[in-house]
Image (cartoon, helix red, strand yellow):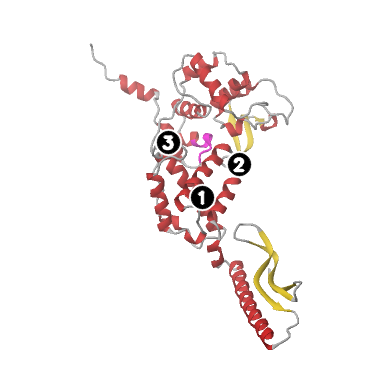
Amino acid sequence: MGVHLREKKLKNGLASLYLDYYPPIRKEDGSRTRREFLKKTIYVNPKNAEEKKKNKENRNFANRLLYEREREILNEENGIFNTVNKKRDFLKYFQDLADRRKKIKGTYDSWLSSLNYLTKFTGGTCLMGDINMDFCNRFKEYLLSTEKLKTIKELKLSNNSALSYFNKFRAAIKEAFYSRYIEENPLKHIKSIPQKETKKEFLTKEELQKLASTDCESALVKKAVLFSALSGFRWSDVIKLKWKDIQHTESGFFIHIYQKKTEEVIMHPISNKAVELLGQEQKPDDKIFDGLKYSDSINKIIKRWVLEAKIYKKITFHNFRHTYATLLLNNGNDILTVSKMMGHKNLKTTQIYAKVLTKAKTDAANSIDIQL
């Protein structure tokens, strides 16, 4: 990379001084430019001593800045922190990171919510140089004590929502640190918000069978829901599945796809029953659930279907993924295998599902028998 001092002639006999970079550099807002205008001018043809003196002063200023920029570029190329990055807009950087996730609705919404709380906390101004341990701790406490945004009632933000938003904040800082916008990662010595257990609704095997035997107003929704219960696939993966993604080996059927949420390529085994549910195979590039689109009506259809089956639980599409994990554990599969089947990166995530009513627990409960 190189930087040179240049002049741009103006109409009034003056020339504007600027630095010319090659290749282009990133500005504070993240965009790229080749030119940095110094807001200094010189006389193209100085007529007197005063104009010559002014030229000398402005050239000296420009050369000092040129030296400073060369040193910053050299430091950055050698892994030394560039102090100019302290002036970059962290909120704009956070927004850019959120925008990369626009295609994953749930994740994108969570990133935007985190950004909204951060913007409210900072009053709309936050530079990379503002990020330190004290700032992070104060934002953490703010999330734990603040009210929900855009609500009629002043309700406190739930613990797990605060955890989710703080984790997005943590991910943004980690990304900024790896990009050398922040000199040190201030979060390495800050504990995350502890996760509180929540009730994860699921269907029993009997309820799932009952639901499968009940008519649904949308055959497509019914097929997608039952497939999620038999495979554990998220909505974001179900809607983009193509027939060519289903493959077969001597060991059985599996789905080979790029998973959006984890950003990983997976080979996920599925049962013969799940394949049977999908029906007759179509063209390789055709979507399996063609016509299925996200809308609030999907969960309304599921709600009416569940009530029609006389199941009195609050069930959404995602609860069928919970059902899959719970039934796997309830059928005696070890937690490590279930963790891999769910695509969890952390075993602790799978352990949330481990507190289920297994046959062993039921037998234990019935082992104490008295005559009444």
Residue 71 is drawn in which quadrant?
A: bottom right
Q: Which residue is identified by label 2? A: 102
Amino acid bearing label 1: Ala
Which x, y percent locates residue 24? 69, 63
Above or below — where is 255 with respect to 129?
above
Q: Is any atom of residue 94 visible in this view?
A: yes
Q: Along the line of sight, which residue is nearer the eye, 110 or 285?
A: 110
Count every numbered label the image shows and give the total.
Answer: 3
Nearest to the eye among marks 1 and 2: give it: 2
Nearest to the eye among marks 2 and 3: give it: 2
Q: Which residue is identified by label 3? A: 351
Magenta residues, start to end: 339-344
What is the distance, in whole Å, between disc 3 and disc 1 at their CAs? 23 Å
Point out the residue furthest to the top here: 372
Residue 69 is drawn in which quadrant?
A: bottom right
Label 1: which secondary element: helix
Amino acid bearing label 2: Lys
Q: In the visual, does 218 lie left or right of 129?
A: right
Which x, y percent locates residue 111? 53, 44
Q: Which residue is identified by label 1? A: 171
Which x, y percent locates residue 214? 54, 13
What is the distance, in whole Å, between disc 1 and disc 2 at their CAs? 16 Å
Residue 20 part of the magenta segment: no
Q: Along the line of sight, which residue is nearer the eye, 294 or 92?
A: 92
